[in-house]
Amino acid sequence: MNISNNLLYSIAREGLPLTRFTLRHCFGRHSYAGIFCKYKCQGFNHLDLELPFLNDQHVVQLSSFLGDLMSINLSCCLKLSKLALYALTKNCPLLSEIKMEGIGKSMSVENSDSLVEFGVYPQLKSLYLGKNQWLSDEGIVMFASNFPNLQLLDLNHCNLLSEGICQVLRICCKIRHLNLSYCKKVKLHGMNFVVPNLEVLNLSNTKVNDKTLCDIKELLWAFATIT
Amino acid sequence: MFSCDDRITNVGIGSALCARPTLKSFSFSPLNMKHEISIPTSHFIDSLVSLKGLTCLDLQFMNL
């Protein structure tokens, strides 16, 4: 075992009462996921692992030991796909916040049947999927069906998204905060229904025009903030 | 919380940790990945894991 391995092994072996753990942009030859699985490190409430080498297999293994996890950030992990997202929500019953911004391109919805089987996970409240330029209308609608209790949805710079957003708002009627900034195809022409819980709506650098904006205002809660 | 320049060493960080055995949160980031402090020494590691009340740990740009 070399020095670099020693740090993570030592943390695991000593059983430090870590509840919040961040490893960002760290590098080395070893799989951190394997290390933590080996020692069955439990007790993490918040994990921040912006590690580009992490793949689905790592996250699947890791998720089975994260029963106390409440939030996770896996942004910039270029090798991850939807499998990682689903493993986390399936294996971590307390998980309410996931950040997976700018992840790999393989997260597209290529098989809707498997998503139906995946089921519904009402515990997830906040989902950050910004900067995923491969994310389609079909994909985000599927996610909305899987996570119907979302209160925060951040989809900034998701350039493929268009009218699917309206369907998302119909399914996830508890959404309070929606960020669509730089979704350059979004027009919201199909938004002709009341969205009672929306408090913050970011439409900067979208295709929403003045008329649509005027119509939307009538459908939002009186104190909603639109930017 | 340390965002280190090249005057801080592994020894210095390790000693600082030993002086604060009740530390609960530790954030550490070397100036860049080429800095020698990005590779933790055994002294650094021993000092870190001696913090038995540590609940928050943040390591960035480290060679682990």
Image (cartoon, rainbow, N blue to C red):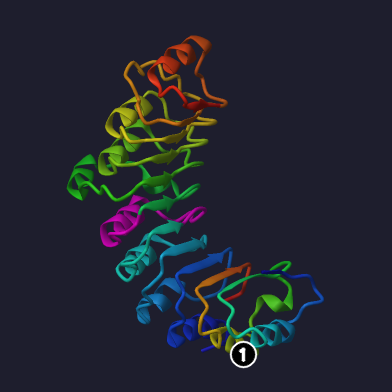
Local secondary structure at mark 1: helix
Query: Which residue is rendered at x = 25% and y = 49% of the image?
Result: A121
| Residue A83 falls inside the magenta stretch | yes
Q: Quadrant of the C terminus of chain A?
A: top right
- Residue A110: give x, y in percent of width and height: 29, 41
Q: Is residue A116 above or below residue B40?
A: above
Q: Is residue B27 above or below residue A131?
A: below
Q: Residue furthest right?
A: B7
The residue nearer to you, when weighing A171 against A222, is: A222
Query: Which residue is rendered at x = 47% and y = 25% of the image?
Result: A223
Q: Residue furthest top?
A: A211
- Residue A98: give x, y in percent of width and height: 41, 52
Q: Which residues are magenta?
A: A74-95
Q: In this rendering, would A118 be left or right of A6?
A: left
| Residue B17 falls inside the magenta stretch | no
Neighbor class of circle 1 (other Cα within 10 Å; few <14, some 14-19, many 20+) is some
The residue nearer to you, when weighing A10 against A131, is: A10
Quadrant of res A65? bottom left
Quadrant of res B19? bottom right
Query: Which residue is rendered at x = 46% and y = 56% of the image?
Result: A74
- Residue B33: give x, y in percent of width and height: 69, 69
Badge 1: chain ID: B
Q: Is residue A60 above or below residue A197?
A: below
Q: In this rendering, would A205 be left or right of B16?
A: left
Amino acid type, callout 1 = Ser
Q: In this rendering, would A54 be left or right of B26?
A: left
The residue nearer to you, when weighing A158 against A122, is: A122
Please name the residue that numbered disc 1 is placed on: B42
